[in-house]
Image (cartoon, rainbow, N blue to C red):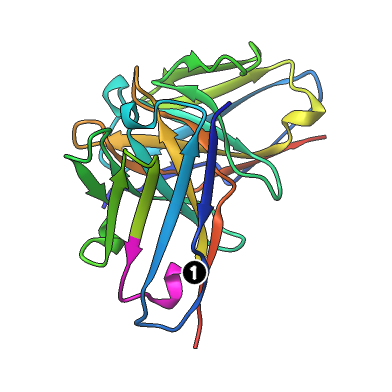
Amino acid sequence: QVVVTQEPSLTVSPGGTVTLTCASSSGAVTSGNHPSWFQQKPGQPPRAVVYSTNNRHSWTPARFSGSLLGGKAALTMSGVQPEDEADYYCLLYYGGGLLGVFGGGTRLTVL
Amino acid sequence: QVHLVESGGGVVQPGGSLRLSCAASGFMFGSHPVHWVRQAPGKGLEWVAVISYDGSEKYYTDSVKGRFTISRDNSKNNLFIQMNSLRFDDTAVYFCARGMVRGIGIDDWGRGTLVTVSS
């Protein structure tokens, strides 16, 4: 089965910019993989952040943006806030759009 | 307001069975695909299965194929997953998650129910 890879951990200063990436073992990530991103804080269920590469949900702050970058999906956070400290997971879809595979997650520290 | 409430978790022996339910409210359940996602203690998210809005299409991750069966009852706004031949590595919090009607993605999550496979 496909393996989706994310950076295990990243650190960013408050107010800074950070980019998280999501790679697929099957090749370049494309819009056809409908990359999604989720934020999870300790003891809480995940919260959707971005879907279909670069679409924010109605509750997602504008400082979050999704893209494709160098064959990977990417989530960029600009003007990072302390409350953005969390685990972030990407989800890629295969086989026509319903079969999903999560990445291993990135622990983002705001320090 | 969207509500997804999972139930049915508990402790089960290896080789045993369990049926999880997810009660949905606050939206047109029968219009949305619905997913099961799990998270082992201290680990990352694992996508498990999805069922289309009308139940006609079902997909599973390789590790549960042939053991888990996803189903839904749109008349009662319920999602289910029947889990057979449970193994130690099936121990996890199981979340149900609402798929989007427009676009491909997940937009809402339940709080999860814990399944522990232990002898």
Q: Residue B86 in magenta? A: yes
Pinpoint residue A79: horizontal percent, then vertical percent.
Answer: 74, 15
Q: In the displayed structure, does residue A71 sit left or right of residue B1?
A: left
Q: Residue at x 58, y 40 (%)?
A: A46
Q: In the displayed structure, does residue A98 sit left or right of residue B35?
A: left
Q: In the displayed structure, does residue B103 sit left or right of residue A14?
A: left
Q: Of helix, strand and loop, which one carries label 1?
A: loop
Q: Amino acid at mark 1?
A: Thr
Q: Residue B69 in magenta? A: no
Residue of label 1: B91
Q: For mark 1, name the chain.
A: B
Locate the N terminus of chain B and report the quarter of the image it occupies.
top right
Pinpoint residue A76: horizontal percent, then vertical percent.
Answer: 58, 20
> Which is nearer the eye, B119 or A81?
B119
Q: Residue at x 49, y 88 (%)?
A: B119
> Which is nearer the eye, B33 or B76?
B76
The outermost residue toward the bottom is B119
To which quarter of the image does residue B18 belong? bottom left
- Count the marks: 1
Pinpoint residue B118: horizontal percent, then vertical percent.
Answer: 51, 82
Pinpoint residue B83: horizontal percent, then vertical percent.
Answer: 34, 66
Q: Residue at x 31, y 38 (%)?
A: B74
The outermost residue toward the left is B56
Q: In the displayed structure, does residue B104 sit left or right of residue A102?
A: left
Segment tinted magenta in the rendering: B82-90
To which quarter of the image does residue A31 belong? top left
- Measured along the vertical axis of the image, is residue A55 above or below residue B42? above
- Measured along the vertical axis of the image, is residue A35 above or below residue B118? above
To which quarter of the image does residue B90 belong? bottom left
The outermost residue toward the top is A62
> Which is nearer the eye, A67 or B34?
B34
- Measured along the vertical axis of the image, is residue A58 above or below residue B28? above
